[in-house]
Image: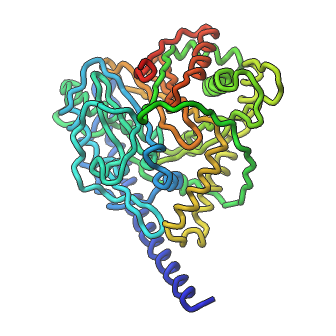
Amino acid sequence: MSDIQKKIDRLHIKADKKQQKLHIKAEKQQEKYRIKEEKLKQKLGNADNKSSYTNSEPVELPKWDRLDNTAHLFPVIAGEHMTNVYRMCVVLSEPIVAKYLDLAINKLLPWFQNFNSVLRQGMFWYYFEENSKPYPPVSEEHTFPCQYFAPNANRDYLFRVSYYDCRINLEVFHVLTDGSGARNFLRELVYQYLGYAHPELVEGSKQQLSSETSLNIEDSFEKNYRNYNFMAYKSETAYLIKGTYLKDHQMGIIRGKMKISDIKAASKKYDATLNEFIVALVVFGIYRGALHKGSSRQPITVGVPVDLRPYFNSDTTKNFFVMVSAKFHPLKEQEYHFEDIIKEIKESLRAQITKDNLEKVFSFTVGNEKIFVLRTIPLIFKRMGIKAFYKGAARKNTTTVTNIGTIDIKAPYKQYVKDYYCFLSRSYGQDIKASIASYDEYLSVTFSSVLEDTSIQREFFRKLSREGIDVTIESNGVYYG
């Protein structure tokens, strides 16, 4: 080994030790913050007819923070054509007043460290730093959804709030948080907005945060990581949906809204959970709408994000999920029925969605991050490796179906909240995706696509209708032109 190489190695070791010390210091700060947060929340009461708030000021937060394990991927692969941005929408019973939305955002930012951040590039990893710039004034929606967060745009904030008529739109770059973390923020944003629009809803002269809102900023991947064991993942390239793209970076949105009780009853007929039923319906739509009931050398593989919080007793506002895959492989030149598809989907998902297996999956990725040699590789080289790995892994899924979950709104505010839904942007090899969200008695399945053809969506909703489910369909109008 040359003297120059030895010097480089010593510099890497020294830099890594310094970074470890900074991480330990940040973790101690976060633990102090968490203890203070818990003490504040213990003071909160539960009110049925009035919102329950603390009048305390935001606790001082660390000025910087490291990314969670999953978040390392997103800044590397994000760009104009693959933004890694998702949108959540809440529809109110009255038109949005921009000034109240501005007030609500500025009220929340001191509390939410991950949303009040700018992304920086270090020598070895990306990291978050407090954003000292004021959040830009909200504006009425004027472009297609899930646009790229370009560097130095939006005053460096990695989330975007807009409105249209009665609808509040929250768009989030996935590096900040997953769907559960964004839903937590959006719900509190709605509370704050309605508190300004309807002061009679607020108990006392001040409103701060609701007692149900999480401020936890722990890295739950790191906290729940277990002994690292190498796992050799065996997966094959999936069937990829091809077609003509919509023009000018357009994204077509088709949403179906139905009663939760109806779709649960249909799921029960197949001894399936609601998620299993919807994933099987999406596969059914691809089999009939894209493959036209034909065979395929590659399986139809659906990536299904699993929220890890219920399995590991976490309420973190950072990313905390893993991906599992549901597969159906139409090998034979015969017509497969929905019963054939849902049988394979159930077996595939149930074998993977266990606490033990989920722990192994994320411990594998966290373990890779802990390998000393990999940690000391400069970020410029890590980026090349991550991109190459992602492109290979991305071809293992045909599409993604995510269930963002239910948004629960308190009684005094519920009279003003009418609807809730979400959707995803495209990713490499996945030009159409589906998202599930529910509020009150209704569930929405929303397809987002950059393809002109809508055969998959049509087959999906036709099958729902044949199952006796009354579905209301709406679109953003892209397919009408």
Total residue callouts: 0
Q: Nearer the viewer, residue 340 or 41?
A: 340
Residue 131 in percent (x, y) is at 28, 55
Task: Looking at the picture, tell me which residue is in the foreground, 156 or 304.
Answer: 156
Q: State the residue in front, 415 or 236.
A: 236
* Residue 357, x across and y down, in percent: 69, 46
Q: Residue at x 38, y 29 (%)?
A: 89
Task: Classify residue 51 by image quadrant.
Answer: top left
What residue lies at 28% left-to-right and 26% top-to-bottom? 50
- Where does the N terminus fall, quadrant-wise? bottom right
Quadrant in which residue 222 is drawn: bottom right
Name the residue: 73% across, 21% down. Answer: 293
Q: Is residue 471 above or below residue 39?
A: above
Instruction: Decide which of 403, 385 is in the foreground and name it.
Output: 385
Q: Residue at x 42, y 48 (%)?
A: 176
Q: Position of residue 138 (x, y in %)?
A: 24, 37
Q: Residue furthest left?
A: 205
Can residue 58 be spotted in the picture? yes
Give the color scheme: rainbow, by chain, secondary structure or one colour: rainbow
Which quadrant, please, contains the C terminus?
A: top left
